[in-house]
């Protein structure tokens, strides 16, 4: 069972926030590729769609890993997910402008 403020809780929260940002990025590129019929935007939509699926997989994996492993596994996962979220936030900011 997850403790309210454990490393696993933070890791899962970051993974869920990443899902929201990658969904926005994917939907932005997908809609624009359909409107502009650009091959480049279609490839960006595919690329961001793969990231979206990957973040869903990360969140699900984190939930299952939290049931089996202790905090020593959560800390590296938290670092990886945090760096991933920072990258998605930068891309999100670029997409919005």
Image: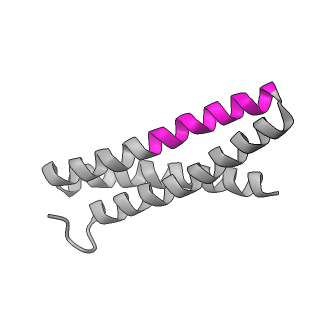
* Residue 77 drawn at (x, y percent): 35, 49
Position of the N terminus by quadrant: bottom left
The answer to whether 86 appears left or right of 96 in the picture is left
Range of magenta residues? 39-55
Residue 56 picture location, percent across and down: 42, 46
Task: Report if residue 15 lies within the magenta region.
Answer: no
Measuring from the top left, give residue 70's x and y in whole percent.
Answer: 16, 55
Residue in front for this viewpoint, 37 or 15: 37
Residue 31 in which image quadrant: top right
Q: On the rendered structure, is 65 left or right of 12?
A: left
Q: Position of residue 49 (x, y in %)?
A: 58, 37
Q: Is residue 49 rendered magenta in the image? A: yes
**Residue lying furthest bottom:** 4
Query: In screen coordinates, is 25 left or right of 16?
Result: right
| Magenta-drawn stretch, dominant element (helix, strand or loop) | helix
Q: Residue at x 71, y 48 (%)?
A: 28
The residue lying toward the viewer, choosing from 72 and 59, is 59
Q: Residue at x 63, y 31 (%)?
A: 46
């Amino acid at each position: 069972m997850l403790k309210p403020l454990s490393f696993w809780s933070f890791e899962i929260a970051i993974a869920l926030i990443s899902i929201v940002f990658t969904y926005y990025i994917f939907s932005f590129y997908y809609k624009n590729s359909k409107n502009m019929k650009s091959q480049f935007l279609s490839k960006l939509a595919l690329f961001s769609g793969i990231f979206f699926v990957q973040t869903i997989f990360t969140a699900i994996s984190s939930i299952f890993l939290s049931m089996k492993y202790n905090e020593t596994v959560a800390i590296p996962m938290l670092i990886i997910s945090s760096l991933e979220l920072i990258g998605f936030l930068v891309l999100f900011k670029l997409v919005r402008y």
